[in-house]
Amino acid sequence: MIEYVFLLLGVILMITGSIGVLRFPDVYTRLHASTKCDTGGAMSILIALTIVAEAPMLIKVKFLILAFLIAMINPMIAHAIARGAHKSGVEPEGIIDIYARDGF
Amino acid sequence: MSRIPLYLKERIEEVNKRALLDSFESQKLPRWEKTAITWFALMIFWMVVSASFHWQNILIGSIVTFIVSLLMYDMFTGDIQSSGNVVIKTLRILLLYIPQYIFIMAFRLLESNLKVMKHAIFLDINPGIVKIDSDLHSQTGLTILANSITLTPGTMTIDTVRKLDESKLYVHWIDVETMDRDKAGSMIKGDIEEWLKNIFW
């Protein structure tokens, strides 16, 4: 029963991330939507698979290792994209930009 | 300080810098403890990935991971603080700190997903990039802090600046509430930095 809750949560989070990517105004705010919702959605779908899969315990732990790797790697990719966008001159919308003011 | 000649002042600053570096170096673990921790972590990873308890499997795995940990001992564990016995330290990290961190971050991640959902539907955003200070000085600790900030609600790290005695983070905040550096730091970092100070220097 609880695996359906996790699967539904994952699907809803993925759809929300896609809506956010379409609606937000610039690169940085779009990265917010894609990073957080992808991480949460993929991790909850993997937890649901861990509960459902008919396999020995050590095979199930591999799903958890995948979830751990996703949680480690996704923020780094967002960090790299945001820094690269700022270095190549994409101006962020908003009220303050201390990163440009400090001369990077 | 203004009465000191210029060459003496530079010399004093250099000595201070070296003393700070030495105090950081003395907090590191000795070499065989680093090797042992790396071997232990690699061995657990090997057992989970290969998924078999045959004795040949365990023998091959222990030999290969021992060679790798002799070569790579400084890579993962070079930034761990030294305090107390190594076995107690490893057990405390594995059984207390890591479950605590996973428990904190799971609820933070759920909260941040719900917050992005709210922002995507109502579009009530007020973005900006702010600068905060951090008390962590090691590379691994700063990396984990930046990743955690990216996964907590409403914030995303853009760049980190690490010097010998001060480290700064540039954070993109989707709904800027305050420009003050200390207040913004305590609002963004929360209790994650206190947790990370238990392990890294």
Image: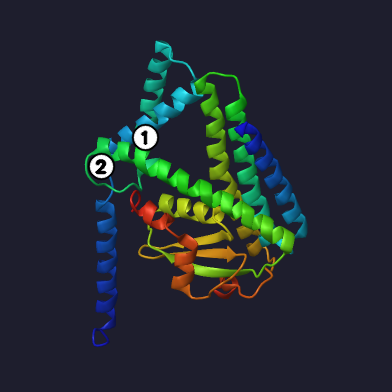
The chain letter for the residue carrying disc 1 is B
Quadrant in the picture for the N terminus of chain B: bottom left
Please report, as a chain letter, where disc 2 is located.
B
The kind of residue on which mark 2 rests is Pro
Is label 1 in a helix, a strand or a loop? helix
Q: Quadrant of residue B21?
A: bottom left
Residue A81: quarter of image: bottom right
**Disc 1 designates what residue?**
B38
Q: Amino acid at mark 1?
A: Thr
What is the secondary structure assignment of the residue under circle 2? loop
Q: Which residue is mark 2?
A: B30
How many numbered tags mark residues here?
2
Q: Is residue B115 left or right of residue B14?
A: right
Q: Residue furthest left?
A: B84
Residue A39 position within the rendered picture, expressed as x and y whole percent measured from the top left: 61, 45
Q: Is residue B2 above or below residue B132?
A: below
